[in-house]
Image: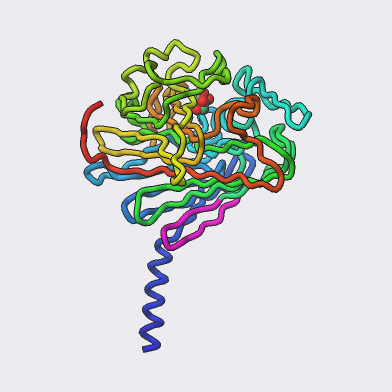
Amino acid sequence: MIRMCFLLSLLVSAFAMADEPVMTDFGKTKDGKAVELYTLKSDSGLVAKVMTRGATLVQIHVPDKDGKSEDVILGWDDVAGYESEDNQYFGCTTGRVCNRIANGKFSLDGKDYSLAINNEPNHLHGGVERSLDKVVWKARPYTTDSGHGVRFKYTSPDGEEGYPGTVTAQVSFFVAKDANRINITYKATTDAATPINLTNHAYFNLGGAGSETVMDHVLQLNADRYTPTDDTLIPTGEITAVAGTPLDFTKPKRIGARIEKLTDTAALGYDHNFVLNPRPDDQNYNFAAFLRHKESGRTLRIWTQEPGIQFYSGNFLEGQTGKGGKTYAHRSAICLETQHYPDSVNHKSFPTTILKPGDEYKTSTLLHFGIAKDQADN
Ligand code: GLA
């Protein structure tokens, strides 16, 4: 009997092992740091791969309506790809502050700060050399009853990329066993007041990364309003209704249907921060976005605790060569970046992005993949 129990427990642990995140070597950065890649799987076919450089989503495979799996995010097969000029923040954790800070300047507690200008005339996505997408994070895989994940940790020293405070940031990617869902949770603490606004910058094409366009995808956003910008994509401070504009995605709409009306604007297409409608009091997450690709039947629903979402239609993609030699053409992927509004540090009327010592920054976003039940056109 004892022997039977022992054998049984061996068998159970063998299965449990098979469930746990698998780590492989992803190569080295150009300054010689080893990069690890972790594979996370659900029981219904989702396979996600995340790496320690930039706490980055490298692959997400999900089945289509016929059960055929495809990688639905842009990226590269090696670290060198991610380090190249071609990388426009593919799949990374973006920060310390995602999106733009006007002229790279802000004041906090009576002190003026100047950050790198890497998107003339503004600061973009946390800076140049040591932004959170470019550093190598420490990883710790974990397993719970409901699934498994990887927790990435990085301590950014005081003054890194010009930001005040030593910030300890954590990002975990958790894949539920019973659903094709990735839960991304961000946490941070600091020893001095500092702005923080973290997001993930995955580029999705639900027809498979490398498909020609994303203009045929149907998108719905839970946003009646957006934050208009000046010609350098800095919010003016106004919050304006989307009704009657090409930004009205309150009902599902084909992305390509009205984009040409925006081609000659500063955004060059869609590149706007949408103000999510308020989260119902009894809900932990707010519905943010629904994306559907008719041909494959794949869908993506995004739920978040953030007040905004940047919808960017890949206007700067320029035909770079990515995973498996595939070409990433202009507007062939879409980013849906859950976030606080851009340049919040310079707008008192926006929800604050200032983290203070003793407080914890904590926010989650869910990426829930599925298959469309009906193929109704929009
Ligand atoms: C964000 C910005 C875009 C662009 C991309 C990266 O989505 O809003 O303007 O900078 O990142 O290329």
- Residue 280 place in picture, x, y as percent: 44, 40
Task: Determine the residue located farthest toward the right in the rendered image.
Answer: 110
Asked which quadrant contains residue 244, the reply is: top left
Q: What stretch of residues is rendered in magenta?
A: 138-151
| 104 lies above or below 301 | above
**Count of numbered tags:** 0
Quadrant (top left/top right/bottom left/bottom right) for the N terminus: bottom left
Percent from the top left, x then y, of residue 299?
31, 38
Q: Find residue 61 and report its horizontal and vertical position in percent.
A: 36, 44
Corner quadrant of residue 206: top left
**Residue at the bottom extreme, as displayed:** 1
* Residue at 39 percent of width and 29 percent of height: 333
Q: Is 68 part of what is drawn in magenta?
A: no
Residue situated in front as seen by the camera: 222 or 16: 222
Residue extending furthest toward the front: 281
Residue 63 is at least partly visible in this image? yes
Colouring chosen for the image of the structure: rainbow
Q: Nearer the viewer, residue 123 or 237?
A: 237
Q: Is residue 15 found left or right of 201 in the rendered image?
A: left
Residue lying at 46% horizontally and 46% vertically, measured from the top left: 284
Q: Residue at x 56, y 41 (%)?
A: 54
Residue 234 visible in the shown view: no
Who is closer to the viewer here, 29 or 61? 61
**x and y percentages locating residue 296 in the rendered image:** 26, 36
Task: Please check the rendered image and state whether residue 148 is part of the magenta-colored stretch, yes or no.
Answer: yes
* Residue found at x 59% / y 38%: 134
Specify the principal SS of the magenta part: strand
Which quadrant of the figure contains the C terminus? top left
Q: Would residue 330 appear left or right of 378 to someone viewing this image?
A: right
